[in-house]
Image (cartoon, helix red, strand yellow):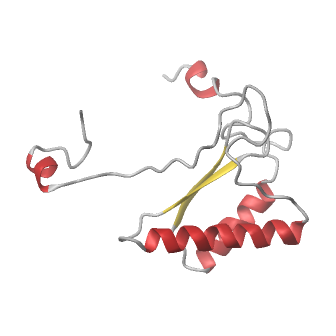
Amino acid sequence: MIDRCTIFWKGPYYCGTGADKAFGRNIVDAHYKACLYAEIYISGTNGEVMPGQWEFQVGPTIGISVSDQLWMARYILERITELEGVILTFDPKPIPGDWNGAGYHTNFRLVTYTTRKQGYAHGLSH
């Protein structure tokens, strides 16, 4: 059983649902659909810690194409927010306070010959 504190320690907006928590979901959904239409490999979205702060994930892709897809996904998001009359910022911490920053993190998985040989291909360890 999952402890409720494990899920909710980041506050009500992180992965939140409901009109009082998920501000801008219409924009996030429109962005997701537009990226899929543009054949950008967008693999997910989620609400973040600050109200109105969202995250999207691009990938998996092969090689450097992830950079092109990320730039295009950002452009599409800029256009959608422009059409909606919403100001978009990629600032990692636009409002002072006790909020987590959104510091452009990147998730990646490194699988080499050595890690495969050692059996770490399905979950790397230290």
Quadrant showing the C terminus: top left
Position of residue 113 in the picture relative to residue 65 (left or right): left
Residue 13 lies, in percent from the top left, at 73, 36
Furthest toward the bottom, the residue is 38
Query: In the figure, residue 32 lies in which quadrant?
Result: bottom right
Q: Is residue 91 above or below residue 9?
A: below
Furthest toward the right, the residue is 85
Query: In the figure, residue 18 lies in which quadrant?
Result: top right
Residue 51 lies, in percent from the top left, at 79, 40
Q: Residue at x 78, y 61 (%)?
A: 27
Position of residue 105 in the picture relative to residue 8 (left or right): left
Count of picture labels: 0
Residue 14 lies, in percent from the top left, at 67, 37
Of residues 108 and 2, the one drawn nearer to the viewer in this rendering: 108
Furthest toward the left, the residue is 117
Position of residue 85 in the picture relative to residue 70 (left or right): right
Residue 96 lies, in percent from the top left, at 79, 32
Position of residue 110 in the picture relative to residue 46 (left or right): left
Q: Residue at x 49, y 69 (%)?
A: 67
